[in-house]
Image (spheres, rainbow, N blue to C red):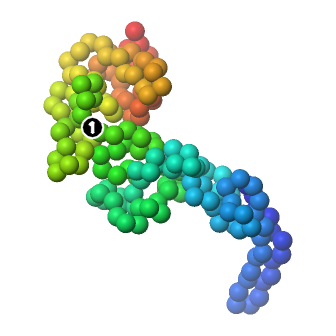
Amino acid sequence: GYRRALAIAAGQFHSAAITACEGEGFLPGSCNCQRGHKQYDCSVVCQGGASNPCSGKGTFDRENRVGTAADANYDCEPDGSCVCLRGYQGSACDITCAPTSERHFRTPVGGRYNCECVEGWSGVLCNVQAGLNTTNLTSTSGAATSRRAGQGACIMIVLCILRLSTVL
């Protein structure tokens, strides 16, 4: 999308600009962004997509992340990133931190999931066991990356930083 200045007027105590905004992301006939779009030209789409920003699990409550009634209006941050409700993680808040046989998250407290791993496990999905020589990390797309334990750092579900000498 883009904003086009149609007229600019300046006076001693004020100024005004009349603009027209066109393109994907703008509300029709307006220079306001549609839900799920951000920035001055509405070109940034929220993680999770414009139709389901932050997978519906984002929150204004950055400190406690327990959510408020205002969260129904939350789509994402100005840069398109998400602040996830407690119990959800991932760039689009699309990972539920529920313990399973493959995901070793701590047991929920008070009915709320938390995204902490039980002792002896680590990784975004709590699926990396401590003390193993090699571990396969599987993304939600099914792609696997091998590395030696302790020689790399996973920072997102599909993004790992590895030292070249540790690739098998």
- Residue 129: percent from the left, percent from the top? 23, 22
Q: Residue at image x 20%, y 49%? A: 111
Q: What residue type is labelled 1?
A: Ala
Quadrant assignment for the N terminus: bottom right
Which one is nearer the viewer's eye here, 51 or 168?
Answer: 51
| Residue 14 picture quarter | bottom right
Decide if residue 92 is on the left or right side of residue 148.
right
Locate residue 121 relative to residue 5 in the image: left or right: left
Q: Is residue 165 visible?
A: no
Q: Which residue is drawn at 17% across and 27% down?
A: 120
Answer few, some or many: residues within 10 Å of disc 1's Cα (few below 14, many 20 plus, some between 14 and 19): some
Q: Which residue is drawn at 68% across and 63% down?
A: 27
Q: Residue furthest bottom?
A: 12
Q: In which quarter of the image is the C terminus?
A: top left
Kind of element beneath mark 1: loop
Which residue is denoted by mark 1 in the rendering? 98
In the rendered view, tell whether residue 145 sits above or below residue 74.
above
Q: Where is residue 118 in the image (x, y as percent from the top left)?
A: 18, 33
Total numbered circles: 1
Q: Name the residue at the right extreme.
A: 6
Q: Which residue is drawn at 72% across and 63% down?
A: 28
Residue 128: x, y in percent?
28, 24
For the residue pair 132 and 37, the one nearer the viewer reads as 37
Quadrant hosting residue 157? top left
Q: Can residue 149 be seen in this view?
A: yes
Q: Image height check: is 136 above or below 87? A: above
